[in-house]
Image (spheres, helix red, strand yellow):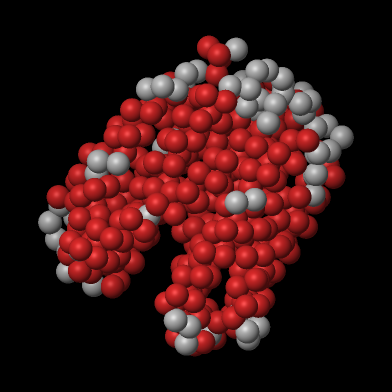
């Protein structure tokens, strides 16, 4: 006899409700982070159509990074002090409108401002959504991984969706990406109204800033590797492995697809072996995968290692988000703002250092260096402690 046959219907409904909300938050996260991925995917088309200089083009990426990275910890503080139930919906709407309108305006200053506004929308979404998703997930890291994986899916879909639209219609095609933001904002508002009355009580416990700082450093290392790979993997395939542009695009797709699989697998693994061990295991696994990627000959065999490297690198992703909230039980919004926003963006700011190595020795030197970087994450992970031990 199954559990559904034994349990009363209302119990089954209560069990199914949180998971449905987790999938809704996962989809919302995918749409929100879609706009983060659409900005770098669109920059080359602004250069070609508007004749922007490389400096102006990098300025657009900087606007998106500044808008999304700097405000997130402060938004997290506000979310923790004030409930702000509609902030996640407003954030994804602002992110979509900012990006969607950027291709319709002429002056560069206005384009830059709209891209900045889109980044600010992303900053509004992450802390509020991270806190709400944690409330829906409870203590299940597997459920939290559904939310975290949504962001990786959004990054994966951005170039897939943007390229054909921008090639066919020009930068004015950015407006086609406004409807998903409107739809998701509407759904999140409905979810907020349904769950507001049954909201979880504020978490209690001592905030442990020391382990949280170590965890933030681990996330910076992880995001540095992620930014280095996504920036140079296609150039590595074309200029070092002598692969076609199609194979180079396939390499990036394999890496991002592996990231989705690793995020989901990491959540399930953490429920079995613990949060801290999963973070340490991810740091160990990614090293041989990167070595295999760097050492494999030809443009085809390394595709497998691109997928495996993406999976290993993202095994700790959902775990880091949940573990950060466990370290700061009274500040889940702040924790989400740092782990999902600030630390990820700092990794992106470090990535230009790899560009210096690529200019001097080619993109293959970048991947040689990347093989060693995760060792720092493992060493830092040894200083992490279980949240239960701290309590």
Name the residue at 29% across, 52% down.
306
Q: Position of residue 334 (x, y in %)?
A: 65, 37
From the image, which quarter does the N terminus lie in?
Answer: top right
Look at the image and tell me whether residue 40 can be seen: yes
Name the residue at 24% across, 65% down.
359
**Residue 275 vs residue 40, the one in the foreground:** 40
Look at the image and tell me whether residue 127 can be seen: no
**Residue 327 vs residue 57, the one in the foreground:** 57
With 236 as the anchor, is 115 left or right in this view?
A: right
Q: Is residue 231 above or below residue 369?
A: below
Q: Is residue 68 above or below residue 215?
A: below
With 248 as the anchor, is 241 left or right in this view?
A: left
Which corner quadrant of the image does residue 172 belong to? bottom right
Name the residue at 32% across, 34% down.
376
**Residue 353 vs residue 329, the one in the foreground:** 353
Q: Is residue 19 above or below residue 32?
A: above
Which corner quadrant of the image does residue 220 belong to? top left
With 160 as the anchor, is 253 left or right in this view?
A: left
Q: Position of residue 150 (x, y in %)?
A: 55, 49
From the image, which quarter does the C terminus lie in?
Answer: top right
With 137 as the anchor, is 188 left or right in this view?
A: right
Which corner quadrant of the image does residue 382 belong to? top left
Q: Is residue 356 above or below residue 347?
A: below
Q: Position of residue 37 (x, y in %)?
A: 51, 62
């Amino acid at each position: 006899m199954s559990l559904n046959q034994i349990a009363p219907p209302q119990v089954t409904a209560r069990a199914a409700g949180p998971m449905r909300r987790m999938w809704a938050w996962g989809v919302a996260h995918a749409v929100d982070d879609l706009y983060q991925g659409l900005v770098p995917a669109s920059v080359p088309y602004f250069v070609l159509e508007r004749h922007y200089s490389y400096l102006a083009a990098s300025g657009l990426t900087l606007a998106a990074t500044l808008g999304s990275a700097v405000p997130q910890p402060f938004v997290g503080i506000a979310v923790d002090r004030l409930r702000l139930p509609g902030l996640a919906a407003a954030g994804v709407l602002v992110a979509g409108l900012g990006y969607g309108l950027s291709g319709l305006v002429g002056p560069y200053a206005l384009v830059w401002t709209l891209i900045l506004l889109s980044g600010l929308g992303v900053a509004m979404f992450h802390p509020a959504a991270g806190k709400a998703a944690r409330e829906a997930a409870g203590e299940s890291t597997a459920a939290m991984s559904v939310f975290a994986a949504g962001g990786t899916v959004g990054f994966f879909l951005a170039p897939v969706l943007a390229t054909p639209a921008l090639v066919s219609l020009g930068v004015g095609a950015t407006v086609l990406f406004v409807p998903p933001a409107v739809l998701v904002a509407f759904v999140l508002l409905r979810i907020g109204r349904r769950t507001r009355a049954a909201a979880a009580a504020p978490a209690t416990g001592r905030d442990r800033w020391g382990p949280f700082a170590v965890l933030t450093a681990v996330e910076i290392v992880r995001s540095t590797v992620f930014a280095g790979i996504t920036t140079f993997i296609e150039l590595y395939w074309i200029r070092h492995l002598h692969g076609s542009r199609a194979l180079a695009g396939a390499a990036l797709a394999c890496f991002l697809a592996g990231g989705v699989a690793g995020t989901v697998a990491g959540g399930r693994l953490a429920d079995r072996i613990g949060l801290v061990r999963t973070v340490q295991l991810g740091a160990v696994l990614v090293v041989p995968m990167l070595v295999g990627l760097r050492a494999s000959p030809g443009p085809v065999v390394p595709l497998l290692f691109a997928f495996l490297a993406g999976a290993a690198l993202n095994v700790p992703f959902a775990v880091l988000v949940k573990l950060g909230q466990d370290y700061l039980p009274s500040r889940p919004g702040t924790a989400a703002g740092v782990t999902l926003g600030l630390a990820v963006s700092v990794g992106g700011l470090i990535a230009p250092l790899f560009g210096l190595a690529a200019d001097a020795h080619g993109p293959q030197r970048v991947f040689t260096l990347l093989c060693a970087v995760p060792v720092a994450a493992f060493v830092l992970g040894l200083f992490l402690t279980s949240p239960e031990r701290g309590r």
